[in-house]
Amino acid sequence: MQQKMSENGAIPRQGKVLTVDTMNANVKKVDYAVRGPIVQRAVQIEKELKEGVKKPFDEVIKANIGDAHAMGQRPITFFRQVMALCTYPQLLDDNKFPEDAKNRARRILQSCGGNSIGAYTTSQGIDCVRQDVAKYIERRDGGIPSDPDNIYLTTGASDGIVTILKLLTAGEGLTRTGVMISIPQYPLYSASIAELGAVQINYYLNEEKCWSLDISELQRSLQAARKHCNPRVLCIINPGNPTGQVQSRQCIEDVIQFAAKENLFLMADEVYQDNVYAKGCEFHSFKKVLFEMGPEYSKKVELASFHSTSKCYMGECGFRGGYMEVINMDADVKAQLTKLVSVRLCPPAPGQALMDLVVNPPQPGEPSHQTFMQERTAVLSALAEKAKLTEQILNTVPGISCNPVQGAMYSFPRITLPERAISEAKAKGQAPDMFYCMKLLEETGICLVPGSGFGQREGTYHFRMTILPPTDKLKLMLNKLKDFHQRFTQQYS
Amino acid sequence: MQQKMSENGAIPRQGKVLTVDTMNANVKKVDYAVRGPIVQRAVQIEKELKEGVKKPFDEVIKANIGDAHAMGQRPITFFRQVMALCTYPQLLDDNKFPEDAKNRARRILQSCGGNSIGAYTTSQGIDCVRQDVAKYIERRDGGIPSDPDNIYLTTGASDGIVTILKLLTAGEGLTRTGVMISIPQYPLYSASIAELGAVQINYYLNEEKCWSLDISELQRSLQAARKHCNPRVLCIINPGNPTGQVQSRQCIEDVIQFAAKENLFLMADEVYQDNVYAKGCEFHSFKKVLFEMGPEYSKKVELASFHSTSKCYMGECGFRGGYMEVINMDADVKAQLTKLVSVRLCPPAPGQALMDLVVNPPQPGEPSHQTFMQERTAVLSALAEKAKLTEQILNTVPGISCNPVQGAMYSFPRITLPERAISEAKAKGQAPDMFYCMKLLEETGICLVPGSGFGQREGTYHFRMTILPPTDKLKLMLNKLKDFHQRFTQQYS
Ligand SMILES: Cc1ncc(COP(=O)(O)O)c(C=O)c1O
Ligand SMILES: Cc1ncc(COP(=O)(O)O)c(C=O)c1O
């Protein structure tokens, strides 16, 4: 521990304190494809375009991330009116704002310390917002009770998901917590599992059956995992990201039964709960199904479900609003959870306020109701149309096959890649679909995420593409992609 | 792993998946006094008062947390105007808003995806905000360059601090990362260290010398820690929370020299950088002093410094805005940091926008400049006055002795407790100053945090009290406290 002085008395340069070799090893293992190398390259290309570098395209189309406003979707007027009123309450005297917007703003501000959205809130979230969330859940779930005490507001759904995974991570070696996640998955899960040093357990969705979930596959995956860790958590994303499937009621019941039988904590990621497009599909919350299965389940199965302001019809990603509801959580653990979230003081108050509006939108008879409904419907029907369009156009391309986009905001088509492309990619040390997406980006400006970023069955290749660009641009993009795919296939055949 | 069926075929009730015994053991070790049992009781009492329960007081005075708006401080008009414009851009056509506010809003929106504050931002934070932060740091530090690439926007300073600690936590047993923190400390540090499973290393501030930092104490503490862990990080809070001291330039230089010599990563928590009140005291950033010490230091010592929208004159806690600047961080580690923050997508965009205004406030000649300066000065001079007042009144009470509140927002007086009170507390399993604060709350409605929540030298007792209540209320509170202390001392003598 002693320092050697150099001859001039100066302190000898030692290496850095913090290097890749001496940093947190779990953090090194984290992978996050949605904002990975493709996206970094896309940002570079945008800069190059701005600097006048000639490219075979004029703009980068970012279909890599579920970010509706970035793709031109307009915010819901009522939401932004209330947020402006909360932010600058002098506007409460302005007769340009409708009364219902003013009433919401007043109610939210009354729940804030010093009537300011600039005060820290309670760590669990503003009381009246949690009450409104509970009422929303009750309405959504046909009257099944929800307790505001079980609601935690979060900094986006991401925050809630990481927090619950954190609570659940324990043990070492064979007893280390295992977390079952679907493959393909939303990479927040694998990233958080890596960061926490938990064990990732893959179960594969059934691409042949429209990305549905088979209990036999859950069983297989669990059995295999029990040999090397302690599986304690089952994560479900419904509607699915990146795969766009919507689970049937029956399937949810089966999953709950499975979780009960196998003593698994359920995490239901339901951030796309309003994004259901396909005929015959409907959103069923895990909470509702759980309670409809009777007390044997509803009093036993531990469940955390997550929602967000980022998706659905509002797409307010930047506000980082969200909530989670915990069911059957041990009281002492809940106290620990409350303590844990208090360390970071509170989720952002504007995000909490926005979450309030999502769960308590304008009601029939209120001045803003009609506009609100028009705006909401316009967004959701455009998405439904684009979901259909995407599937249809992609399925006209030889070598691309795309399941129906039943819900959420993404297609996840399978692509056939020529052997020569695969070996060229491997020679470069790249996943073949990364190689494909990188070339697509360079040649067309279209930015997608390769399937390898989400996980997929060995030997299959995919990409994820959002359905968010405006219809015209989406069509253009799909046709560009079609051309590219044919060119690529030819080039490597 | 097999399930036994009960006779009626039902699944046997097993225990919960997640219990205090099977949860994350590190989370269990986390302690967070600022929102601990005292505050929970305060919230209860408020409810009781509302329900009409008779108490010897009419309201709870929350002097437990540095939450300016909750204590009645008004937001800075310009900041809220720009935030309202960003939130509801239709207001850009409203001639009630000054042009400089509109220009800021336009500039921020142009940097947002789809020109909406509802879009996810880049994970490191909005480009133009990071550029403005860098320019602010350059101005503040007399021209020493700052690179926007070294700036990361955060969800409050809390988020940045936890992220850097996370990167630094590695090793096992004797090689486990040790983190040096001042005692008394802001409990975010001890909580995060516990959560990450790092090793907390205490160095004591010198209460006799106005809570200053002695290098000999750093040396002692480091030497002792090296026997059982790998000390790699030195955390400094300046101006100090809970102790309110402002470090001299000389002391900062000594600390930097120490960190260089002992190969420690420096974390400088400078969220109170505008909160300096005492004559002869001045804020010196670690970055500035580091660079003034010459290339031997400025090219070597690794430093992360933190700022926030929550404190200073703006007190915008609810927005959860913040930034960190990293200096001399290894390039590969920086790439890892960028990846890590991308997992949670981005900090809240409104908080980022607000951070922008803090680092780029109205300039001389702009229409909002005068009002802005008036508002800013009013807040800071009121705080300076209250800092003085607090020290003066507290020091009139026999059995209370209070160092000057040189900066930040807190006094941390030492209290003498009668032996009988100490033994009664111990019999109840309570820290003696917790016992004192609990009684104070029940009898007067004043909510403080006991010194034991921050750490203190064995056998000494303190409490932390914010200087945030309006002057009249603060005086009232201090006098109530005076009476209480005398009563308490009598009762237990
Ligand atoms: C399935 C899923 N869960 C969670 C999230 C995180 O959303 P938030 O912005 O609320 O953190 C996303 C974002 O794309 C998602 O797709
Ligand atoms: C010293 C110190 N650091 C960090 C923080 C966290 O502030 P923020 O609201 O920016 O997370 C606080 C809050 O009180 C603090 O006192």
Image (tube, coloured by chain):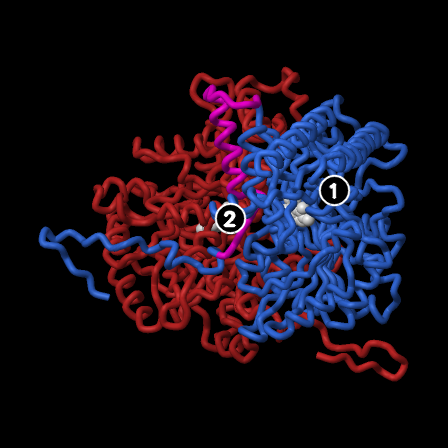
Chain colours: A blue, B red
Disc 1 sits on a residue from what chain?
A: A
x and y, in percent, of residue A44 in the image: 48, 32
Vertical relation: B130 (above or below) B336 = above
Q: Is residue A414 a member of the stretch shown in magenta? A: no
Residue located at (61% from left, 26% from top)? B115
Q: Main secondary structure of the magenta part?
A: helix
Residue B493 visible to the viewer:
yes
Q: Residue furthest left?
A: A7
Disc 2 sits on a residue from what chain?
A: A
x and y, in percent, of residue B52 in the image: 76, 56
- The quadrant holding residue A395 is top right
| Nearest-to-viewer mark from 1 and 2 | 2
x and y, in percent, of residue B465 in the image: 49, 54
x and y, in percent, of residue A51 in the image: 46, 21
Which amino acid type is marked by label 2?
Lys
Relative side of B385 to B99, left or right: left
Magenta stretch, residue numbers: A29-58
Q: Is mark 2 within 8 Å of ligand 1?
A: no
Q: Of the residues under marks 1 and 2, which one precedes in the sequence?
A: 1
